[in-house]
Amino acid sequence: MYFIDDSQVGEGDEGFDKILQAIRTHKNARVTLKIQYNSSFGGNSLKDSLPFARRFDELTEALGRRKLIYEFA
């Protein structure tokens, strides 16, 4: 499930599309990725462990020069 400002926006590609649109629309917004992860990453890259790993380049493009902040729960 994807959220914007603590409001659910959807799941899967549909939810991720809404996230990308919000990032593109709000050019000065700070973008924080909150991750709930229950086990060790076990040496895998963070990018590859994300549910949208295959679309990570789209996220990077939408962010432009902004940094992505990771927050682990």
Image (spheres, rainbow, N blue to C red):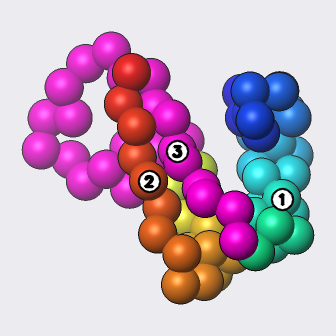
- Mark number displayed over residue 33: 3
29 displayed left or right of 40 = right
31 displayed left or right of 11 = left
Residue 54 visible at all? no
Magenta range: 28-51
Q: Closer to the camera, 65 or 11?
A: 65
Check residue 36 for magenta coloring: yes
Q: Quadrant for the N terminus, please.
A: top right
Secondary structure under the numbered disc 1 in the rendered image: helix
Residue designated by label 1: 22
**Residues tagged 2 and 3 counted as in contact (Cβ below 8 A):** yes
Q: Quadrant for the C terminus, please.
A: top left
**Mark 2–mark 1 distance (CA, rounded to whole Å):** 16 Å
- Point 36% across, 30% down: residue: 72
Q: Residues within 10 Å of mark 2 (few under 14, many from 20)?
A: few
Name the kind of residue labelled 3 in the image: Leu
Residue designated by label 2: 69
Name the kind of residue labelled 1 in the image: Ala
Residue 16 screen position, x and y as percent: 76, 49
Residue 63 screen position, x and y as percent: 62, 74
Rendered image quadrant of residue 15? top right
